[in-house]
Amino acid sequence: MSEVSLLEVAGLGKRFPSRDGRSDARWVIQNLSFSVRDGEFVTVIGPSGSGKSTLLNMIAQTDAPSAGTISFKGAPVSNGDGAGLRPGLDCQIGYVFQDDTLLPWRTTIDNVLFPLEAQGRLDAHGRERAAALMDAVGLTGFERYYPHELSGGMRKRAALIRTLVYDPPIILMDEPFGALDAQTRVQLQEDLLRLWEAGRKTIIFITHDIAEAIALGDRALVLSRAPTHIIGEHHIDIPRPRNLRDIYAAPQFASLYEAIRAQVQ
Ligand SMILES: Nc1ncnc2c1ncn2[C@@H]1O[C@H](COP(=O)(O)OP(=O)(O)O)[C@@H](O)[C@H]1O
Ligand SMILES: [Mg+2]
C-alpha cells in the first residue's frame, strides 16, 4: 500500500432544503474529513439516515457538496456549485449500489460488458477480462442467463464484476451485501477480498454491520448521527489473507468490535 493519498475529503458539508421551503435547510453532513491511500480498503459504519449514501454520491460526483472540498490525486474535483460535476469522474470511480441494478433485458455477460460498451472501449481484451472475472466468481456457464434466472448472490456477483471490468482506481460500495442471507454474504465477502487482493484497488465500503467492517477493512471509520462527521477511526491489523468464516476468532476482533460498538450507539 502506498502512502500517497488518492482521495481527500476536507471539511465536507451537505445540506438539503427543507420540504416546506420555509424552515432552514438541514445539514446532513457537517465538517467531515478523511483521506484514503492508494490501494487501501476503508470501511465506513454509520447509523441509518446519517448521510452515508449522500457522502458516496458526492465522492462519485453525482451530487455537489454544500461546503468543503473533495480532492482526487491531489487535485480538487468539486467546487460546491454543482456546475462542474463529472459523474463517475471520467470512469475513475466505480459504484456498487445496494440494489444490484442489473438490466433485466440483458444477459449476465451483456450486463457485465455494459460499462465497456457504454464507454466505447469494448474489445477482445475487455471480453477476456470479463470472462476471467466471471470465472473468478463462479459465473462461468451462466453467461446467457438473464438476471431473473439467477439467485440473489449471483446477481450481486454480476453487479460486482460489472464494476471491476473497467478497472476504476476507486470503487465505492454502498451496503452491497446488506440484503443477502448470512451464508451468501460470507461467500460474497470472500469473493470480494480475493478479487481485491489480486488487484488492490482502493475501496470505500459502507456497511452498518460492525463485523463486516472489521472483516474486510484495513481501516474502519465510524460516523455520527446527522449532521454526520467522523467520530472514530480504527486500524484493523488482522493479517491477510483473512479467514472470514472465523473472523470472530481473530485475537484483535473482540476489542475492535467493542470499541466500534461503543461509538456506533
Ligand atoms: N436528495 C435529497 N433531498 C433531500 N433530502 C435528502 C436527499 N438525499 C438524502 N436526503 C436526506 O439526507 C439524510 C441522509 O440520507 P442518506 O445519505 O441516504 O443516509 P444513509 O445512507 O446513511 O442511510 C436522510 O435524512 C435523507 O432523507
Ligand atoms: Mg444509504
Image: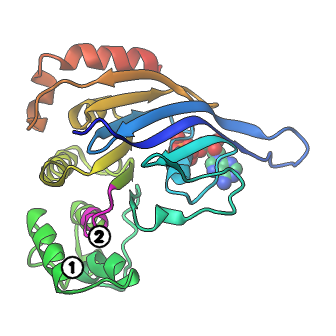
x and y percentages locating residue 73 in the rendered image: 42, 49
Q: Secondary structure at mark 1?
A: helix
**Circle 1 is placed at which residue position?**
126
> Height in image: 42 above or below 134?
above
Picture coordinates of residue 87, whole percent (x, y): 53, 64
Which residues are the magenta region?
A: 160-169
Q: Residue at x 55, y 53 (%)?
A: 77
- 245 left or right, relative to 158: left
Quadrant in which residue 83 is drawn: bottom right
Residue that appears at 41% across and 14% down: 262
The foreground one among 181 and 262 is: 262
**Residue 138: which disc?**
none
Q: Are marks 1 and 2 in contact (CB under 8 Å)?
A: yes
User: Is-magenta flag for residue 168?
Assistant: yes
Percent across and percent down for residue 102 are 36, 72
Question: Reading the chain from its start, which is encountered first: label 1 or label 2?
Answer: 1
Q: Residue at x 22, y 43 (%)?
A: 182
Residue type for callout 2: Tyr
Crowd band around label 1 with a 10 angstrom C-alpha radius: few (<14), some (14–19), many (20+): some
Q: Amino acid at mark 1?
A: Gly
| Quarter where residue 98 is shown | bottom left
Badge number at residue 166: 2
Q: Residues within 10 Å of mark 2 (few under 14, many from 20)?
A: many
| In the displayed structure image, the side of residue 92 where residue 16 appears, left or right | right
Real-space Cα separation, disc 1 to disc 2, in angstroms: 8 Å
Q: Is residue 214 magenta?
A: no
Residue 212 falls left or right of residue 142 = right
Q: Residue at x 19, y 50 (%)?
A: 196
x%, y% of residue 193?
Answer: 17, 47
Query: In the image, is residue 94 above or below residue 189?
Result: below
Q: Is residue 265 visible?
A: yes
